[in-house]
Amino acid sequence: PVVFSGRIGVSRNRGEADTLELSLGAGFVANDRGSFGASVSHATAPGTARRPVTVLTARVGYAPGARSTAEIGVTASLYVGGESPSAGFGVFWQGEVFPR
């Protein structure tokens, strides 16, 4: 199955201008062990000199067991805008503290 997600929000920090945030994503379960996803998010502070930032992210996950609630994987992100473009990479592990 494919799962689509989206979010619109406003961040308020003391002493700074409000930031408008928008994000869209999609996740796909390839089989009982593999999944991947992609998302794009954009943040801007209207009426300020701050540059907008757009982030493109991709992730791949793998469940070590067919009935496992745990997942390990990697992420890659590209940050465009702001002061200068940059890239980020990560490794993750997620699971349930109290499995069913």
Image (cartoon, rainbow, N blue to C red):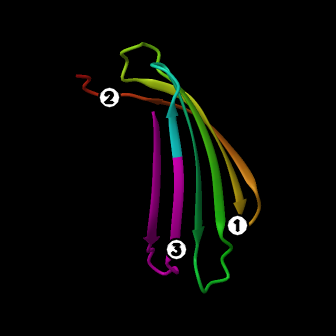
> Is the residue under label 1 in contact with that under label 2 (CB below 8 Å)?
no
What SS does tag 2 mark?
loop
Where residue 74 appears, as percent x and y from the top left, is: 59, 32
Does residue 51 appear left or right of residue 2 in this picture? right
Q: Mark 3 points at which residue?
A: 19
Amino acid marked by disc 1: Gly
User: Helix, strand, or loop for circle 3?
Assistant: strand
As measured in the structure, the alpha-carbon distance from the residue carrying label 2 to the one carrying label 3 is 33 Å
Residue at mark 3 to residue at mark 1: CA–CA distance: 13 Å
Closer to the chain start, of discs 2 and 3, is 3
Residue at 46% of width from left, 51% of height from top? 5
Using the rendered view, name the quadrant where residue 88 is placed.
top right
Residue under numbered circle 1: 82
Q: Which disc number belongs to residue 90?
A: none
* 95 relative to 39, above or below: above
Horizontal side of residue 25 vs 69, given as left or right: right
The answer to whether residue 30 is above or below residue 8 is above
- Pointer 3: residues within 10 angstroms few (<14), some, or many (20+)? some
Residue numbers of the magenta segment = 1-25
Where on the picture, by quarter, is residue 67? top left
In the rendered image, which quarter contains the N terminus? top left
Kind of residue at disc 3:
Thr
Residue annotated with mark 2: 96
